[in-house]
Amino acid sequence: MAASPHQKIDHQGPKFRAATPHFFHMIVDKRLRVPKTFLDKYAEHLSDQIHLKLPCGSEWKIKLRRCNGEVWFGKGWPEFSEFYSLKKGNSLLFRYEGNSKFHVLIFDESGTEMDYPIAITLIEETDEEDDSLEYIQTFPKTKHKTGPLLSPLPQEKSRTNPHSSSSSKRVNVEAANEFVSSHPFFKVTLGSYLGMNVPASFRKHFTTMETEIVVRLWVGDGSWPVKLIFHRYNGQLSAGWRAFSKENSLKKGDVCIFELIDTNNVALEVNIFRC
């Protein structure tokens, strides 16, 4: 009931506490700290790993890092941020549902809830999905570039086998971080879902503005056709990505760098760093 001019408002009296409490976070940088006021009430109920669930049904596991009385999102958060293309000005609303589980809504700079990309898992995909590639256009059998990208092909990047040692992994992480190219490229670290999110800003490098296209992914002398679907805020590799992931033994933690080497036929060279 709304307070009338004759009612006394007692700010020191009993207060209502929501059964499903929330906290809000606006993206300023890549880090996320759980508000202290939220921790004062619910810290004892939070384990060292929390679960985030999105309206699209995707679920993510995030490790909590405790430091000097503060709690930060740790392992798993960079992959989450990358997958949903979080940037300064975006905001997130976390609804706590108990047992270290949160329901999360993501909003763009205007305060409008985003269209969520769908996470792809190697387990959930079916063989039938690749049937959608029957209409693929003919691609050249070589990786020689046409169109505006005329510089020589980059040298083959050194790759390790899927069972790299810890020392090799460190070397690969450094190599991925130091990667440079004369071609447009983007870098993705694979998360738990092994899905592949394409930054929305990368779309400007394509000659076509269609929302669904087939791209050709090259690793060495091998190539794979994969469907690329553009959503409002990012792109998603879908049909064909499962086969590419399996045949190249991709796993969580690997870093993939995609170079656009042919703008006309939308061919990308994939540099894989086993991390």
Image (tube, helix red, strand yellow):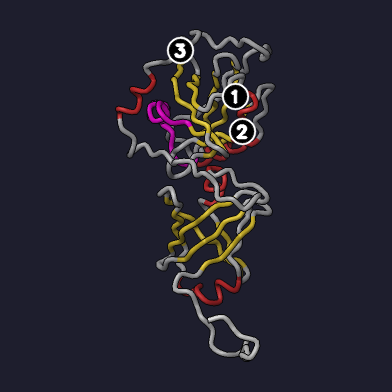
Q: Secondary structure at mark 1?
A: strand
Residue 135: percent from left, percent from top: 40, 15
- Amino acid at the residue labelled 2: Ala
Q: Secondary structure at mark 2?
A: helix
Q: Is residue 219 in view from this perspective? A: no
Going by the picture, which residue comes out furthest to the front?
Answer: 5
Decide which of tag 2 and tag 3 comes sooner along the chain. 3
Q: Which residues are magenta?
A: 237-253
Residue 55: percent from left, percent from top: 44, 51
Residue, disc 1: 259
- At horizontal 49% and vertical 10% (from top left) the residue drawn is 139
Q: Which mark is residue 175?
A: 2
Labels in figure, total = 3
- At horizontal 59% and vertical 62% (from top left) the residue drawn is 24
Alpha-carbon neighbours of circle 1 within 10 Å: few (<14), some, or many (≥20)? Answer: many
Q: Kindly report the distance in space between the C-alpha atoms of the residues bearing marks 2 and 1.
A: 15 Å
Q: Which mark is residue 137?
A: 3
Alpha-carbon neighbours of circle 3 within 10 Å: few (<14), some, or many (≥20)? Answer: few
- Front residue (pair 34, 181): 34
Decide which of tag 2 and tag 1 comes sooner along the chain. 2
Q: Kindly report the distance in space between the C-alpha atoms of the residues bearing marks 2 and 3.
A: 34 Å
Decide which of tag 1 and tag 3 comes sooner along the chain. 3
Is 156 on the left or on the right of 125, as rendered? right
Q: Is residue 59 above or below residue 195?
A: below
**Of marks 2 and 3, the one in the foreground:** 3
Q: Is residue 177 magenta?
A: no
